[in-house]
Image: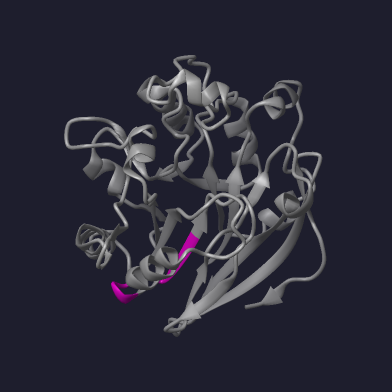
Amino acid sequence: MRLGFVGDLMLVGSLSRRLAKGWDPFEKCAKLLKTFDSAIGNLEGPLTSAHSPTKLKSAEDVKAKKQYILRGPPIGLRRLAEANIYTLTLGNNHSMDHGWEGLNDSLATMQRLNLRWSGAGQTISKARQGTVIDGEVAILSYLAYRSWPAIQACGPASDSKPGIAYMPPLTPKGVNPKALQWLKEDIESAGTERVIVAFHWGDEGATKPHPYQTQLAKAAIDRGAAAVIGHHPHVLQPTERYKGRPIAYSLGNFVAARCQGALGDTAILALEFQDNGAIRALWHPVRIVAGMPEPRGKAVVI
């Protein structure tokens, strides 16, 4: 099993218009992406024809650009499938930007295209469920912000309400016991021995992980995760190994407009699962040019 992980897929805004005109953002990465059994990315915002902007994000914050409401066209999902990005993490701060109507419409299109997802659902138990790739590797997805007011605007699911899987990460004494319980339960019930946990976390623009990211990543591995993948900062953050398991704290952007400087540096992280249980990790450098990821240079073992 060989999987490729990419960062934030922002097929929204000005890129929506290009997609509608037939643009393929993955043209230059398609050959590399198709070498994997599956590629996995974080989908930032619903790709839907439904127009029902969330009321959870205040008009004042949106106008001041403290909050953003994202949406892209359904054709973006077809482009993802054509590029072999068949697994999407939805536990993030934009999946519910057009409410459950917009997200549910996206999910229906995903089903028609045989795309998999985790991190969102009709209830919190559904949102916490992993998606399994070829019966071998499960992907779990959570939003793990520290600020509850910010979480409320993201549409967290509950026992009676659809939305995204929000995992409360911290208490003043360390990792939240509820997070530890969820990780143990969800990893054990994922249906496969190899479980990868994806966290949407950290601070935008930060090039180093916040200490809580490190604590939560190691807690996930202590409870059985084979690897931890992070996104949300929109820039690359370091990788490391803990107990032999790889952690990538942020894979940055992968498709996004206005990617100057550090915002345009990204990578594809390849994880190769060996028969002896070891995981080989390869870092494929990528640069985003005019919204489109382009491979740059040879892969490096990490």
**Can residue 208 be found in the magenta stretch?**
no
Colour mode of the rendering: one colour
Side of 263 where 216 appears, left or right: left
Question: Image quadrant of residue 74?
Answer: top right
Q: Is residue 142 above or below residue 163?
A: below
Q: Nearer the viewer, residue 111 or 215?
A: 215
The answer, for residue 131, to whether it is visible in the render is yes
| Residue under the image location 32 percent in, 46 percent down | 166
Q: Nearer the viewer, residue 116 or 149?
A: 149
**Can residue 228 be found in the magenta stretch?**
yes
Residue 229 lies, in percent from the top left, at: 49, 61
Magenta-highlighted residues: 222-229
Side of 38 where 168 appears, left or right: left
Q: Is residue 207 above or below residue 65?
A: below
Residue 114 lies, in percent from the top left, at: 48, 39
Residue 8 lies, in percent from the top left, at: 59, 46
